[in-house]
Image (cartoon, rainbow, N blue to C red):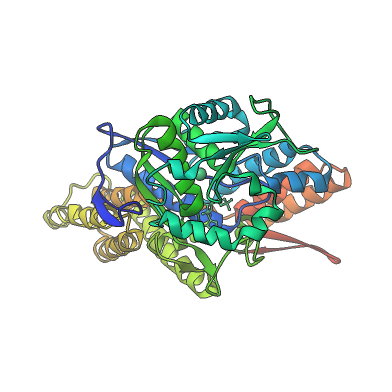
Amino acid sequence: MKILNTLTKKKEEFKPINEGKVGIYVCGPTVYDFIHIGNARPMIVFDTLRRYLEYRGYEVNYVSNFTDVDDKIIKRANEEGVESKVISERYIAECKKDMESLNVRPATTHPKATEEIPDMIEMVKTLIEKGHAYEKNGTVYFRTRSFESYGKLSHKNIDDLESGHRADNHQLKVSGEDEKEDGLDFVLWKPKKEGEPSWESPWGDGRPGWHLECSVMSKKYIGDVIDIHAGGEDLIFPHHENEIAQSEAANDKEFARYWMHNGFLKINNEKMSKSLGNFFTVREIGEKYDLQVIRFFMLSAHYRSPLNFSEELVASSKNGLERIVTAATKLKEAAGKNTEAELTAEEKELISKLPEFEEKFDNAMDDDLNTADAISALFEFVKFANTNVKEESTGSFAKEIYDLLAKLSEVLGIIIEKKEEILDSEIEALIEERKNARKEKNFARADEIRNLLLEQGIVLEDTREGVKWKRV
Ligand code: AMP
Ligand code: ZN
């Protein structure tokens, strides 16, 4: 497989450190709210990378963190008058539900920053001992200029960065960061403020800086050297650049061999983000569309390209996915018929062509995870199936074709089994049960019923005339 490595800007043949094994680290979300569909893009893309590597026979150790200590979490906790942990645990649980709906498999490990503090303190100590970090009034800074190759990932020149910082000097002073030896230095450990979560450390009570978390969690769960480090392209600088500086300065080893960065999900050609307010949560979108359609939509573009979210494009993904699901349903049906009959000579001939389709799919995925071309290969195969599987086909023939379609769809994480249709009468009965549950203030059951229906593509609307429902 070839990977376009952000570090070298070249497509390189992927070679794991240990034969047959791959360690992947993907920066996960900061859990202060529901995730939006922009956040879902790296989840879907790199889950597909993992699936593909597993299909190619690798054993994958996939690690993705939850940043559960952060200003935004603290702000939200203060607004609600609860502990930070209440907020982060709530949104970790919600994020996991969204991942499941998107058919994103749980990581091998999902470390949480707050549970790895002792190791973070250890890394800061090491960096201070080695002269790469220093403490000023309870804050520990990384001495950026002590790390010679700073800027290698983002291809930035350290002196250009310095002048950029000088231009921001006024702002730096305002935020109290003028104690730094150099404008480029960044925080490894910050002192406690009133009302914030904190941990004891040799530099006083405080909490870790965001960049440090990933350096430490990847070291603990993968090792000093990671095969593939991934995330959205906004993380290249400064987050990933700083991760490299910390890890390589502390461990004296190359930090990550391949860097993969996904492009932005956009809306009206602007990055979808919380701060711009132009976002949809996965939950909202799940009320409108089957989230399998969203997964399919995300994979319809190359992961590095920007992708514009629009109703038309999603509608076209919906049609595309339906074409695959319909073909799979027919194949499954055909596989259950004529099961005693032996493959005909013509069928044997056709089956000998299957490896060509698989090869086309693999070649696309081998080319820097080109899921767009892999989907085209899948469509070609669907066409082949629709043309050649007929009423009189043998069950074994249909089954062979179905099995390959299922195998390739599984690599993309696309579910091809049609959901059992829920009957109108069953829906009405559940709505009645929900009404009674709400009367009895059993809101947990009421919510459960709403979600149960949602999973079947039924959306409820509470109106003045009572509950209305529709299939989406
Ligand atoms: P955050 O919680 O903002 O740190 O984001 C979590 C992950 O989502 C990071 O890998 C980001 O790069 C990624 N991300 C955020 N917004 C977008 C977007 N609009 N398109 C693609 N990826 C995004
Ligand atoms: Zn990170």
Query: x and y percent of residue 379 in the render?
Result: 32, 64
Q: Name the one closer to the observer, 235 or 370.
A: 235
Residue at image position (65%, 28%) is: 203
- Point 84% across, 42% down: residue: 81
147 with respect to 106 (left or right):
left
Q: Position of residue 416 (x, y in %)?
A: 42, 53
Could one spot residue 413 in this view of the protein?
no
Q: Quadrant of residue 244?
A: top left
Let me know if residue 37 appears in the view: yes
The quarter of the picture where residue 281 lies is bottom right
Locate residue 188 relative to residue 377 in the image: left or right: right
- Residue at 37% x, 41% y is 256
**In the picture provided, is 38 more to the left or to the right than 287?**
left
Front residue (pair 290, 156):
156
Residue 193 location, x and y as percent? 76, 38
For residue 151, above or below residue 136:
below
Tell me the quarter of the image containing the C terminus: bottom right
Q: Nearer the viewer, residue 290 or 234?
A: 234
Q: How many marks?
A: 0
Q: Position of residue 9 (x, y in %)?
A: 31, 57
Left of 400 or right of it: where is 299?
Answer: right
Comparing 243 with 106, the one in front is 243
